[in-house]
Amino acid sequence: MHHRAFTAIRRSKLSSVVLAALLVTATMAAVASPPASADARMPVSISPQVPSVASGEFLTYNAFVGCSIPEGCTNAVFTFSKPPGASGAGVVAQPYPPGVTSAVSLPNGDVQVTFATVAVGSTKQLVVSWPTVNYYTVPGPQPVTVTGTADTTTSPSSASTTMDVTAAPNLGITKTGPTSVAVDTNFTYAIGITNTATNSRGGLAINDLVISDPLPAGLEFVSATAGATYDPATRTVTWLPADVIGSVPGRQFAAGSSFSVTVRAPSTADPSLEGTTLTNTATATGTPLGGGDLLTKQATAQTGIAVGPGTPVPTIAKTAATTVGDGQNLGYSITVKNVGTAAGTATVSDVLPVAFDLRTINAGFSGTTVDVTYADATTSSFTYTSGTLNVAKAGTTAASVVLHTPSIAPNASAVFQLVGVPAWPSSHPAPPP
């Protein structure tokens, strides 16, 4: 009885000792020095210059190499592995540390630096960089390993580090169209797609972007730009834009593009459309390069269908240079736009400044008639066809003009350029120099 009990106690103590030994071994393994295959006499270390960079910026790493071998580390070669997101050859910052005999980018993208000798007790710094591409560098870790060998070492020395590339898509969509149209009138919806990167950095392309535009009932498809397809069954216009580079598979969309679709509200459409507003929504979808959640953006344009044949509605704007030098031409630009729902003519009357001597008119629209009243109370009429119309009259200046345009279509504009020179009559002396 006593003997068995003593044996059990001894075994229990032995198990405790073994367990304690295992715990000590595990603890030591957690803080163990580099593996025996690395020659500690030629230590290497590497770290990122910054924790992360945006796509389009350089991946830069700082490395330090040393030597404790009395005769030095001769013919020391240090190879830096190419990070996965690098888009081109790596480079070593210059000037090189003393002792470097070559620094080359290898065909696989690695960078190799050779020292004739790293002297005992010395430490050398190497700064190695690789480029990345805005939009086409996938975000994530960028690990690099540096491995060193020398004629006087017994095994390679190595160290590893990593840094991150940040990049994100920024999908945007806009859609515009006329506010109102008449039946039997062609009109156009414009769609803008953007994927904007700030300061040309940090952008990420969008894979397999699809732009779809289902047309509202009552509209007829006429045409579309940029290789669009139209499905009559679903009444949908579809674009598959691409901006493909290199060996990246699939379709990638980077910065931005514009698309348009022209439609018509025919007179044969449902009469109930007249007086209503059509809502047209375009949708853009895609996924980030490298994977991620589906991106979806929408934009809407609303267009009213006018009752009856429609009405022309003019708008007008006039611009001129804020200052002009003595003897220089002075020009006025007048723009008349028809924002209505039917074509119409326009009449523009302009009383000219006393100190302005009108010389020529560019009417923009062939067939425009121009009536000029001069300061001497005489008048002249002209018909514009093309180019520049000379309306100057010797001994006097133009006091006013009236321009009569031919028909201006809905959403179209007529632009008139009135060009002359400053003129200071005796009753209005020129300002002092």
Image (cartoon, grey):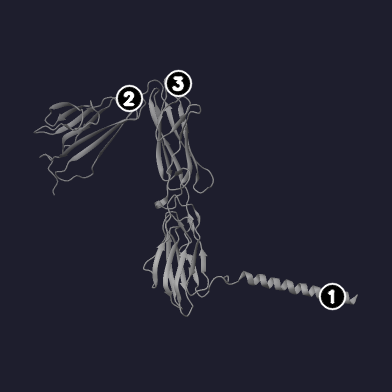
Q: Nearer the viewer, residue 398 or 283?
A: 283
Of badges 1 and 2, the one in the foreground is 1
Examine the rendered structure and indicate whether residue 271 appears above or below residue 411. above
Direction left: furthest residue: 395
Residue occupied by mark 2: 343
Whether residue 177 can be seen here: no
Upstream in the sequence, badge 3 or badge 1?
A: 1
Name which residue type carries label 2: Ala
Of badges 3 and 1, the one in the foreground is 1
Binning the other alpha carbons within 10 Å of mark 2 as few (below 14), some (14 to 19) or many (20 upward) gives many
Of badges 2 and 3, the one in the foreground is 3
Name which residue type carries label 1: Thr
- How far apart are the alpha carbons under marks 2 and 3? 21 Å
- How far apart are the alpha carbons under marks 3 and 1? 104 Å
Upstream in the sequence, badge 2 or badge 3?
A: 3
Residue at the spot 74% in from the left edge and 74% down from the top edge = 17
Residue occupied by mark 3: 269
Image quadrant occupied by the N terminus? bottom right
Name which residue type carries label 3: Ala
Q: Which of 208 and 338 is in front in this view?
A: 208
Whether residue 366 can be seen here: yes
Examine the rendered structure and indicate whether residue 125 appears above or below residue 110. below
Mark 3: which secondary structure?
loop
In the rendered image, residue 415, in percent from the top left (x then y), is placed at 26, 33
Mark 1: which secondary structure?
helix
Residue occupied by mark 1: 7
